[in-house]
Image (cartoon, grey):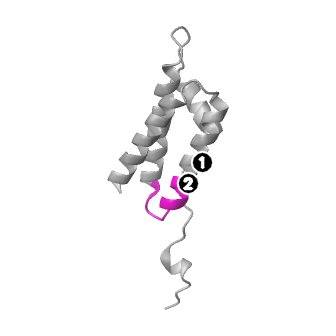
Protein backbone atom coordinates (compact mmCIF):
# COMPACT_ATOMS: atom_id res chain seq x y z
CA UNK A 1 0.00 0.00 0.00
CA UNK A 2 2.86 2.40 0.65
CA UNK A 3 3.89 2.17 -3.02
CA UNK A 4 0.41 3.17 -4.11
CA UNK A 5 0.32 5.99 -1.58
CA UNK A 6 3.67 7.33 -2.75
CA UNK A 7 2.55 7.09 -6.37
CA UNK A 8 -0.66 9.00 -5.66
CA UNK A 9 1.24 11.66 -3.73
CA UNK A 10 3.58 12.06 -6.69
CA UNK A 11 0.59 12.57 -8.99
CA UNK A 12 -0.88 15.10 -6.54
CA UNK A 13 2.44 16.97 -6.45
CA UNK A 14 2.70 17.26 -10.23
CA UNK A 15 -0.94 18.29 -10.51
CA UNK A 16 -0.47 20.94 -7.81
CA UNK A 17 2.49 22.24 -9.78
CA UNK A 18 0.21 22.61 -12.82
CA UNK A 19 -2.54 24.25 -10.75
CA UNK A 20 -0.18 26.49 -8.77
CA UNK A 21 -1.72 29.75 -9.98
CA UNK A 22 -5.35 28.65 -9.95
CA UNK A 23 -7.70 29.94 -7.29
CA UNK A 24 -7.38 28.41 -3.85
CA UNK A 25 -11.06 27.46 -3.94
CA UNK A 26 -10.63 25.53 -7.21
CA UNK A 27 -7.62 23.63 -5.93
CA UNK A 28 -9.34 23.05 -2.58
CA UNK A 29 -12.36 21.50 -4.29
CA UNK A 30 -10.12 19.25 -6.35
CA UNK A 31 -8.09 18.19 -3.30
CA UNK A 32 -11.32 17.50 -1.40
CA UNK A 33 -12.24 14.99 -4.10
CA UNK A 34 -8.77 13.41 -4.00
CA UNK A 35 -8.63 13.03 -0.21
CA UNK A 36 -12.29 11.98 0.00
CA UNK A 37 -11.81 9.30 -2.64
CA UNK A 38 -8.72 8.02 -0.88
CA UNK A 39 -10.65 7.87 2.41
CA UNK A 40 -13.57 6.05 0.83
CA UNK A 41 -11.32 3.44 -0.74
CA UNK A 42 -8.85 2.88 2.11
CA UNK A 43 -11.16 3.80 5.00
CA UNK A 44 -11.19 0.41 6.71
CA UNK A 45 -10.87 -0.18 10.45
CA UNK A 46 -7.34 0.08 11.86
CA UNK A 47 -6.21 2.25 8.92
CA UNK A 48 -6.90 5.62 10.56
CA UNK A 49 -3.20 6.44 10.93
CA UNK A 50 -2.53 5.92 7.22
CA UNK A 51 -5.52 8.09 6.26
CA UNK A 52 -4.31 10.89 8.52
CA UNK A 53 -0.80 10.52 7.11
CA UNK A 54 -2.06 10.82 3.52
CA UNK A 55 -4.09 13.92 4.38
CA UNK A 56 -1.09 15.51 6.11
CA UNK A 57 1.15 14.79 3.12
CA UNK A 58 -1.39 16.36 0.75
CA UNK A 59 -1.59 19.43 3.00
CA UNK A 60 2.21 19.70 3.08
CA UNK A 61 2.43 19.56 -0.71
CA UNK A 62 -0.36 22.12 -1.07
CA UNK A 63 1.45 24.35 1.44
CA UNK A 64 4.63 24.11 -0.61
CA UNK A 65 2.71 24.98 -3.76
CA UNK A 66 1.00 28.00 -2.19
CA UNK A 67 4.25 29.30 -0.71
CA UNK A 68 5.89 29.19 -4.14
CA UNK A 69 3.23 31.49 -5.62
CA UNK A 70 4.28 34.70 -3.94
CA UNK A 71 7.63 36.22 -3.02
CA UNK A 72 6.38 39.04 -0.81
CA UNK A 73 3.64 37.61 1.40
CA UNK A 74 4.41 34.28 3.01
CA UNK A 75 1.76 31.80 4.01
CA UNK A 76 2.15 30.61 7.59
CA UNK A 77 1.46 27.09 8.78
CA UNK A 78 -1.43 28.34 10.94
CA UNK A 79 -3.08 29.82 7.86
CA UNK A 80 -2.48 26.56 6.01
CA UNK A 81 -4.11 24.55 8.79
CA UNK A 82 -7.18 26.78 8.52
CA UNK A 83 -7.25 26.28 4.74
CA UNK A 84 -6.89 22.52 5.14
CA UNK A 85 -9.67 22.34 7.71
CA UNK A 86 -11.87 24.43 5.42
CA UNK A 87 -11.35 22.38 2.24
CA UNK A 88 -10.17 18.89 3.15
CA UNK A 89 -12.33 16.34 4.95
CA UNK A 90 -10.98 14.79 8.14
CA UNK A 91 -9.88 11.16 7.86
CA UNK A 92 -12.93 8.97 8.42
CA UNK A 93 -13.62 5.26 8.23
CA UNK A 94 -16.18 4.34 5.59
CA UNK A 95 -16.17 0.56 5.90
CA UNK A 96 -17.35 -1.23 9.06
CA UNK A 97 -15.62 -4.17 10.67
CA UNK A 98 -16.03 -7.36 8.59
CA UNK A 99 -18.22 -9.14 11.15
CA UNK A 100 -20.59 -6.23 11.28
CA UNK A 101 -20.55 -5.71 7.51
CA UNK A 102 -21.38 -9.34 6.77
CA UNK A 103 -23.80 -9.70 9.70
CA UNK A 104 -22.02 -12.75 11.03
CA UNK A 105 -23.59 -14.10 14.21
CA UNK A 106 -21.70 -16.80 16.06
Give coordinates of residue 62: x percent, y percent. Answer: 50, 32
Rendering coords of residue 69 (x, y %): 53, 18
Q: Secondary structure at mark 2?
A: helix
Above or below 83: residue 7: below
Q: Residue at the spot x=49%, y=26% of the render?
A: 65
Q: Residue at coordinates 55% horizontally, 47% vertically from top-left?
A: 34
Per the image, label 1 sits on a secondary structure element best described as helix
Residue 52 seen by the camera: yes
**Viewer-side residue, 52 vs 17:** 17
Q: Which residue is mark 2?
A: 37
- Residue nearest the observer in this picture, 74 or 77: 74
The answer to whether 49 is drawn above or below residue 15 in the figure is below
Magenta residues?
38-48
Residue 20: name its quadrant.
top right
Q: Up-down: is 42 above or below 62?
A: below
Task: Give the farthest residue toward the front.
Answer: 18
Mark 1 and mark 2 in contact (Cβ < 8 Å)?
A: yes
Farthest left residue? Answer: 3
Q: Tell me the distance, in whole angstroms, between the alpha carbons under discs 2 and 1.
A: 6 Å
Q: Is residue 89 magenta?
A: no
Depth order, front residue of 101/65? 65
Within 10 Å of disc 1 (Cα), the crowding (few <14, some 14-19, many 20+) is some
Residue marked by disc 1: 33
Q: Position of residue 70 (x, y in %)?
A: 54, 14
Which residue is drawn at the image coordinates 58% and 36% (left, top)?
A: 84
Check residue 73 in the rendering and tell me which mark sits there, or answer none. none
Left or right, 88 with respect to 6, comes to right
**Label 2 crowd (10 A; few <14 / some 14-19 / many >=20):** few
Query: Residue 41, image x and y in percent?
Result: 51, 60
Residue 88 shows up from this direction: no
Q: Quadrant of the N terminus?
A: bottom left
Amino acid sequence: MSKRKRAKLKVVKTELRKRMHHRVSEVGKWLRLVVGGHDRYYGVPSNQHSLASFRFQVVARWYWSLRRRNQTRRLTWEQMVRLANRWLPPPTLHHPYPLRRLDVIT
